[in-house]
Amino acid sequence: MNIIVCIKQVPETTDVKINPETNTLIREGVKSIINPFDMYAIEEAVLLKEKFGGKTTVITMGPPQAQEALREAISLGVDEAILLSDRAFAGSDTWATSYTLASAIKKIGQYDLVICGKQASDGDTAQVGPGIAVWLNIPQVAYVKKVEDIKDNKAIVESMTEEGYDIIETPLPALFTVVKEINTPRLPSLKGMMRAKKAEIITWTKNELDVDNDKIGLKGSPTQVVKIFTPPKRAGGQIFQGETPEAVEKLVNAIKDVV
Amino acid sequence: MSIAIIIEKCTGCSLCVKACPFGAIKVVDKKAVIDFHKCNLCGACVDACKFKAILLEKKEVKKTSFDSKGVWVFAEQKKGKLQTVGFELLGKAQELAKKLGTEVAAVLLGHNMEHQAKELIARGADIVYLVDKEELANYQSEPYTEVLVKLIRKYKPEIFLCGATTIGRSLISRVAVKINAGLTADCTGLDIDLEKKILLQTRPAFGGNIMATIITPNHRPQMSTVRHKVMKELTPDKNRKGKVIKEDVEPSLLVSRTKLLDIVEEIESTVNLAEADIIVSGGRGLREPKNFSLVQDLAKTLGAAVGSSRAAVDAGWMPYSHQVGQTGRTVCPKIYFAIGISGQIQHLVGMQSSEIIVAINNDPHAPIFQVATYGIVGDLFEVVPALTKKFKEVLKK
C-alpha cells in the first residue's frame, strides 16, 4: 500500500509570546516544528505500512528550511520526502495550497491513501485536506479517529463528529484527515535519525509540477489578508478573596444572571 | 501585488521585524530583508515603519460588477434536527443583507424536512432552497458538495455562510475548490465594506494570538465558515413571510463513493461542547479520575457540558471527545469554568474566546488567572462542592 502524507512546518505555539509593550507576536527565535496534527498523520502512515507493506512518502510546501520537517518525518519512519519550494508558491491561501499539493500528488502518481492532519496549528483552517481530495477527485473522510480495517481495496474508518463518530466505508484511493485520538506518535529511532541525516530530499519547483501559473501562490489565492491585529486583551480579572463560602457567594452573585 | 523595502529610507531599526506576524523580516547589514516565502503581504510592517521605507502595492478590488446577489446560509441538520449555528448565521445574514440591500436565503439538504423550512423563515430566511432526498438524509461529503455546487451555480449568491462545525468545515472546503471561490475558516467577525460592497471576514490565527481580516475581492460567492455562539440568533417570528423553493437534482449528483455504515453517539453528558452555553472543564488538579464527579455535578446543576484539559484526557480520565484546546476542540461558550486547569497556552487557545472565564485553582500564579474574568484561588475540593450547592439554592434545583 502506497501512502502519501502531507505535512506543514509551523511555529511552535508554546514559543509564541506576546510583547506586552507593543502587543504583537514575538517571532524571533521561535522554533519550527511539524504541525502537531501531522504527527498523527505520519504515525498512521507508518503503522499502515508496517501492517500492509508498501511505501510512504511525505510532502510539504514551504521555504527551503521546511526540509527540517521532512527529515524529522523520515526519522519517524517515512521512506521518502519531497519538498515543494518555489517563490511562486509564496502567499498561497488554502485554495492555492490544496491545488499545489494535489499537483504534486498527481506527479507521484501511484498511491492508495493520502493522509493529512486535521488542521494546522497556525492557520487552523482544516480546509487543505478536503481541498486536495476534490482536486484529485478521490473520496475523503475527515476527522478520522480510527482505521478499523483495510481489505479488498476498501477501508472502514471511524470519523469523529460533535456527538460521537460515524463509521464510514470508502473505496481506495482515498484521503483521510486524522485527529489526535488515532494513535500515539513514536519517538524517532536512532536508525531513523541516521537515515534522516543522510536522506536525499527531493525538491520540486513549479517547473517540475504541471501547474497553471494563475492557480498558485498569491495570484492563485482568492482570499487576501487586508489587516492583521492583536485582539484586545481580556479585561483584568477579578479574584474573589476570603474564606470559601464568602468567595463562592461573590462568584455566584457575579454570574448568576448569565446562568 | 508586491512589497519592497526602499533601501535609502530603511534605517535598520527593526520595528518591522517585531511587527511581522509571520516572522518574514530580518535585518541584515542594517537593512530590512523580506523572506518572500513567508511574507503574506498583510501590510503589518508598512503600518509599523516610521520611515515609510516599505512599499506595498495591492491589487485594487476589480470594478467588475458581479451578477451575484443574496446572502446564503447553509442550514445544517443532523437526524432531521436543525442545528442552532444555522439560526445564529441567519441572524447575522439579515444584518449583512440589509447593508447590501439584498435577501437572505437558507439552503436545507435532508429528507422529510419540509416542515423545518418554515422554522428557517421564522429565524430570518427570506427564501429557503430545499432539496429533499433520501440520499441527503445524513451528511455525506460527495452528494452534499455536488448539490450545493449546483445550487450556487444556478442562483449565484454573493455571500455564503456556514457553521464551522465538523460537517461545515469539510463540506465548504470542498465546495469552495469546486466553484473556484475563496473561503475563510472559522470567522468570529463579519461585516460589509460599504464602499466596496465586499465582505470583511475576521478570524483568529495562531490560536487566537492574532486576528486577521480577510477579503475575497475577485471571486463569488465570498464564503466563510463561522464559529458557534459568536453570532446572535433573531427571536423567532412565526409570522415572518418567506418562500420555500423545492429544488430537484439529477440522481447522478446524489451518488456517494463513501458509505455511511453507522452513526455512534458517545458524548457522556447530554450537551455537546460546541453547542453548550456553559462548559465546566476539569484538569489535572482533580488528581484522580473519580474526582471528575465534582465537575460533572456542577455541570449537571448548571445544565452545562463537561470539558477536559489535555492532561486529564492523556491520563485516561476522560474520553478525547471532551478535550478542549489546540489538539481538541475550540469552544466559545457564555461561561467557561476551568477547574484545576493551570492554563497552558495549548488549552487557552481552545477557550479564550469564551465570554466569561471562571478559574478555580490553588496556585495563584497559574496562567489561567491571566485570562480569567473571575477567579477563586483555593482548594477545588472545597470550592467546587460549595459552588454546586450555592447554585442549587440560587437556581432552586
Image: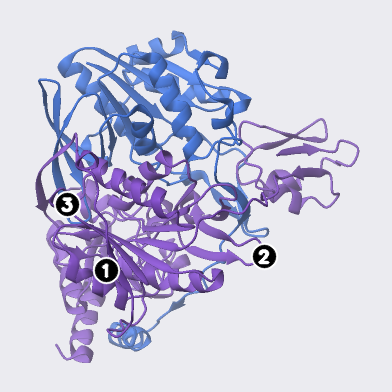
Residue in the image at 47% along x and 58% along y: B159
Do discs 1 and 2 share a chain?
yes
Which part of the image, by quadrant, shows the N terminus of chain B?
A: top right
Residue A108 relative to residue A219: left or right: left
Q: Return the residue at label 2.
A: B195
Q: Using a 10 Å C-alpha cutoff, classify the residue at mark 1 as few (fewer than 14 neighbours), some (14 to 19) or many (20 or more).
A: many
Chain of residue at mark 2: B
- Which is more foreground, mark 1 or mark 3? 3
Give the quarter of the image for residue A133.
top left
Element class at badge 1: loop
- Of all chains in the rendering, the one displayed in purple is B
Q: Nearer the viewer, residue B219 or A216?
A: B219
Which part of the image, by quadrant, shows the C terminus of chain B?
A: bottom left
Q: Using a 10 Å C-alpha cutoff, classify the residue at mark 3 as few (fewer than 14 neighbours), some (14 to 19) or many (20 or more).
A: some
Residue contact at pointers 3 and 2, CB within 8 angstroms? no
Q: Is residue B246 above or below residue B220?
A: below
Q: Position of residue A59 (x, y in %)?
A: 42, 22
Q: Nearer the viewer, residue B10 or A27?
A: B10
Q: Chain A: what color?
A: blue
Element class at badge 3: loop
Which label is found at residue B276?
Answer: 1
Q: Position of residue B208 (x, y in %)?
A: 48, 56
Q: Amino acid at mark 2?
A: Glu
> Is residue B372 visible to us here?
no
Element class at badge 2: loop
Residue A219 relative to residue B392: left or right: right
Disc 3/disc 2 C-alpha distance (Å): 41 Å
Q: Is residue A150 above or below residue B142?
A: above
Residue A148 relative to residue B204: left or right: left
For marks 1 and 2 on the same chain, the one whose residue lies earlier in the sequence: 2
